[in-house]
Image (cartoon, grey):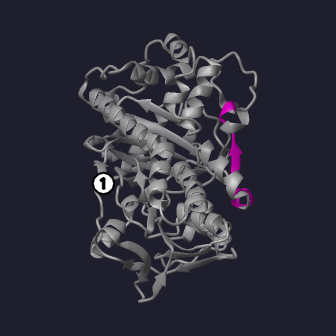
Amino acid sequence: MARILVLGGGVCGLSAGLMLARDGHAVTLLERDAAPVPDSPERAWEEWRRAGVPHFKQPHGLQPLARTVLERELPDVVAACLQSGATIGDPLDYMPPTISDRAPRPGDERFRTLQVRRPVLEQALARIADAESGLTVRRRTGVAGLLTQGANGSARVIGVRTDGGDELAADLVVDAMGRGSRLPRLLAAAGLEPGADETVGAGFTYFSRYFRGAEPVPRAPRLTHLGSFSVLTLTGDSETWSVTLYAAAADRPLKRLRHADAFTAVVRALPRHAHWLEGEPLTGVLPMGGVIDRLRAAAPRTPGVLSVGDAWACTNPTLGRGIAVGLVHVALLRDVVREQLGDGLEDAWRERTDAELGHFYHSCVASDRGRLASMAAHREGREPPAPATPAEAVGAALPLAMGRDAEAFRAGLEIIGCLAPAHDVLARPGLAERILALAGSAPPPELERGVLLDLIAV
């Protein structure tokens, strides 16, 4: 078995540490944040400060795929979350009333989600990791440099030097440092090729607020596009939920949504969303911007180090895929290390990652571009651009068809929940034609642009 270093103690890093340690490897996890793990979920929410995770308290949705991976690979983490107040949600419980066929189908359980806030999930993971045999967690420990062996084309990473001066040797280094991973700089400082990133500039600004009370019954899709902005509602643990409004980063007037009065005025004016305000506010409005879509090419080119989760590819959180894709990537890492540790590991990792997960990144980028173009059209008083391809036409029609047909509804849930790629779902015989026939025309936005601007002029 191997000596493995995992850099980063977020959801992916902790999950990687646990899965690899439970496979028999000697794993050391380094986390540079100094804050100790709180002893309760309440303190995790109220007191835990994760300087290395700027979006720590932002809403995080665990898509059905994330629940599936956790239940299969880390069932004790799911149990700990449930003990901390998490719940299992089923979107079929809130099928639109316009759908008459409400009969259950075999396999419907695959749509269930684990509803939990990020700090509560991470606290459960961290406490289990701290007690895990074969896994050593070192907090308050950052990485100052990489240890390498060889030169030129034969160089490989063989460990790290911590910011405290310790040199830790390893057969494999796993970069789980997330969106802000410093691996490219560490590679360059070690004289290794850092690779080239594919980066798409930040496109959205998010404004979120948490509430507590009796869980509201959804009257609209969890993610609803409304002209020049969108609404996202997520249920958390312990009778909490979040409401997020997001808009194009270029839409300067909508930056006023960071003010609680403007945020509340807009949500209150939405007939299908106003009831989400009927709870005790737990936070003010939490803004977030500067989030990018980025595919990193550095780590797969360097023997001895692999990137996982957001350190490999990160996307705007509009589709809520980050944790789900990250957990699948971690399980894939465990499998590839099990099958291919040694020569050829990096090639196998790159090939499996591209084949099994690359579509998530590319579909997110395409979705972001399409939504930004639609937002710009509504902002400027133009008609949104028509779909450019037949596949785009079906994708645009799917949200409308989901409100009218049980099969279309489930097809949409499969895609949203990361259970199957959109191109596979929509290629099923007769489904695309059914969706197009059901969709009809899109309704006008619930808030005209002028009314929206009047509401936030407070």
84 inside magenta stretch: yes
Q: Nearer the viewer, residue 373 or 349?
A: 349
Query: Is 51 or 448 nearer to us in this picture?
Result: 51
Is 70 inside the magenta-drawn segment?
A: no
**With 125 as the anchor, is 146 left or right in this view?**
left
255 or 432, which is in the foreground?
432
Secondary structure beneath dot 1 equals loop
Inspect the image, locate mark 1, and give the three-letter code of the amino acid beneath it: Asp
Q: Quadrant of residue 194?
A: bottom left
Q: Residue furthest bottom?
A: 165
Question: Which residue position is annotated with label 1?
Answer: 197
Place of residue 137 in the rendered image (x, y in percent of width and height, measured from the top left): 58, 77
Residue 329 location in percent, x, y?
53, 53
Question: In the depicted view, which residue is nearer to us: 190 or 388?
Answer: 190
Q: In percent of the image, x 47 and y 60: which residue is there? A: 344
Pick out the residue farthest to the top. Answer: 437
- Counting from the top left corner in percent of width and height, residue 364 is at 41, 40
Q: Quadrant of the C terminus?
A: top left
Name which residue lies at 48% across and 55% down: 349
Judge from the rendering whether residue 443 lies leftward or rightward of residue 339; answer left or right: left
In the image, residue 416 above or below residue 257:
above
Q: Position of residue 294 (x, y in %)?
A: 35, 51
Residue 213, can we see it?
no
Q: Specify start and end residues of the magenta stretch as a single range.
A: 77-92
Q: How many marks?
A: 1
Evaluate whether residue 443 shows in this view: yes
